[in-house]
Amino acid sequence: MPVIENVDSEKTLLLAKKAMNTFILRIIHYVILIGTYVRQWLIHIPMLSFSKPDNLTLQADARQLKKLPLHLGMIILENDISYSDLANVILWSAAMGISFISIYDTNGIVKRNDVRLSEEIKKQKSFNSDTDYSKSDIQLHSNLEKNTNKSTSQVDVYLLCLKDGRQSIVNMTKYICSHVKQKQIKSMDISPQSVDCLFQEETGYPDPDMVLKFGQVDSLLGFMPWHVRLTEILSLPTHIGVDYKTFRSVMISFGDTEQRFGK
Amino acid sequence: MSWFPEKRIQDSWIHKICSGILKSGPVPRHIAIIMDGNRRYAKKNSMERAEGHLQGFNKLAETLEWCLNLGIVEVTVYAFSIENFKRSKDEVDCLMELARQKFARLLEEKDMIQKHEVCVRVLGNISLLPIDIQRTVAEVVNMSKNNTKATLNVCFSYTSRDEICQSIKEIAEGVERGEILESDISEELIEKCLYTNQSCDPDLLIRTSGEVRLSDFLLWQSAFSVLSFIEVLWPDFSIWHLYAAVLHYQRNHDAVTKAKEENNETREIIQKEIDRDCVIKLSQQQSCDLCSLSNHDNNTIFCDHKCQNENIHAYSLARQKRVDNFVNNLKCRRDSFLQNLLVPQKT
């Protein structure tokens, strides 16, 4: 029967078209993938001339920046974590004068390996004992509780995971509700300003000025939703083997950004 | 210009091919757009600021059509931030006038909205707006509320922190009135109190003009969205930028989906722990004296265990009922706020 044949051939045509489209899309994605790898590789070539920056270079570079983040967030979107590279970035940031650092990964791998990270920091410090890297007092925190006795030269490093993200807003809501119930806070007074003050009082965790994503995924993956309101989001393809030159280049691009605050 | 441009250039063959190819992979269901760069566009092309904003609006109408053709059924746009009230009076007035016109235009184009079955929602702190705009907004929302084919969320007089605080406030009042318990507070409950409670989280967030921050837009909802920061100024945004953004989404799709699933699992685990703790607390309060009297042999302990599981199940059902009830009441209050705006004032 010709009618049915017609329908059949239309169906096959449609299927063929679909398969073709899937095939083309796959090729496009492969091409993009190869493109990103080539670009990454090209960027990594100058790394051969790798040299460790001394404290003076770091401070001089920091002075040249138009602005420096007070709080630098790092989101690790990779499965393998290199603690020595993280330690390096922490020490560079500390020497530049950044006083708060957050390190986030969804599963909290860094958080669980805080001992290892602090050992790496110690090790890197001793490698560089001829410079004054070692002077900065780096404190690791595995939760958002407020630390009371903070000295001026101290650098606070927060290790965070998925449970510190949206959940921190849930906890704040619980805190506010219990105070409203006890008539210590009026529900009328709940505003972005007052809640932000409470966040500051309760955790002492300032909003990150800049977040550096390491890895190929372009998403915050649950990083501190309340606090990323005005955070500049920058990325690097990987944290493994990250050298000072690359780090400095992202700090420069942060320094060049301008914020208008809605105006 | 209209919200529904008469099909200017009938979908050209090249666009058809491209969208066919893109659709064979995962396409975002919901995208969020920060339409940044209207003023810089006006400056660059030496035109009035107002003209820049108008061009930006026209681009929005065009983009919505592209999205529909691609199968993106929900679009959320950042039209006006609460922070924008800080701009010069002239500019705020001009933006309000534009909004007035465009919302009115939407009402005129009722037929098209109903034909395309677009549901328009306005998210934000509406009460900060001039009263006549509030009324128009209420009319637009009311007119299209039963449409389900596509959704356009216009964030107007919106900031994300304000939205979160409104939710916290509602929850705090709910706890105060005794509608819900402090232990009922969870990610899920907060989500249900946000203005976006009827939408799924955006899969893709696009910001134009090369800025790389969220600027108080959907902070909670975009926690697991793919971010696409595009260099182009909003009025110059083209269908190719949209295609590129969708490709970018596809490249990140697997990683983001996995993270979302992990988050949902964590969420469930936390909720189960809370339910268990609540049941234990309750049973400790109620039957403390009974417990101490009875002899604990293996059988009763087994029974206890079984009873406890049943209790937890019963408790979690009761909690869900409480929360649903509370959320329903909140929805009714929000709906009646809009309904009241519809009633013509007798003064």
Image (tube, coloured by chain):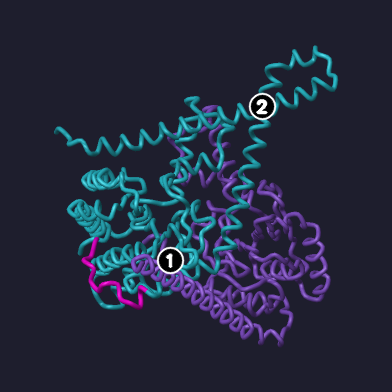
Chain colours: A purple, B cyan
Report crowding for label 1: few under 14, some 14 to 19, many 20 or more residues within 10 A (C-alpha).
Answer: many
Q: Is residue B187 magenta?
A: no
Q: Is residue A157 visible?
A: yes
Q: Is residue B11 magenta?
A: yes
Q: Which residue is pictured at 35% across the width and 37% down the height?
A: B334
- Residue A246 location, quadrant: bottom right
- Circle 2: element type: helix
For marks 2 and 1, give the CA distance: 49 Å
Residue B72 pos. (x, y %): 40, 60
Reading the image, the residue beneath label 1 is B207
Q: Disc 2 sits on a residue from what chain?
A: B
Amino acid at dot 1: Arg
Question: Quick one: quadrant of the C terminus of chain B?
Answer: top left
In the picture as drawn, the residue positioned furthest to the left comes out as B347
State the residue in front, B287 or A32: A32
Reading the image, the residue beneath label 2 is B310
Report crowding for label 2: few under 14, some 14 to 19, many 20 or more residues within 10 A (C-alpha).
Answer: few
Amino acid at dot 2: Glu
How would you classify the magenta stretch by its main secondary structure? Answer: loop
Q: Which residues are magenta?
A: B4-16
Q: Are marks 2 and 1 in contact (CB under 8 Å)?
A: no
Residue B284 pos. (x, y %): 71, 21
In the picture as drawn, the residue positioned furthest to the front comes out as A1
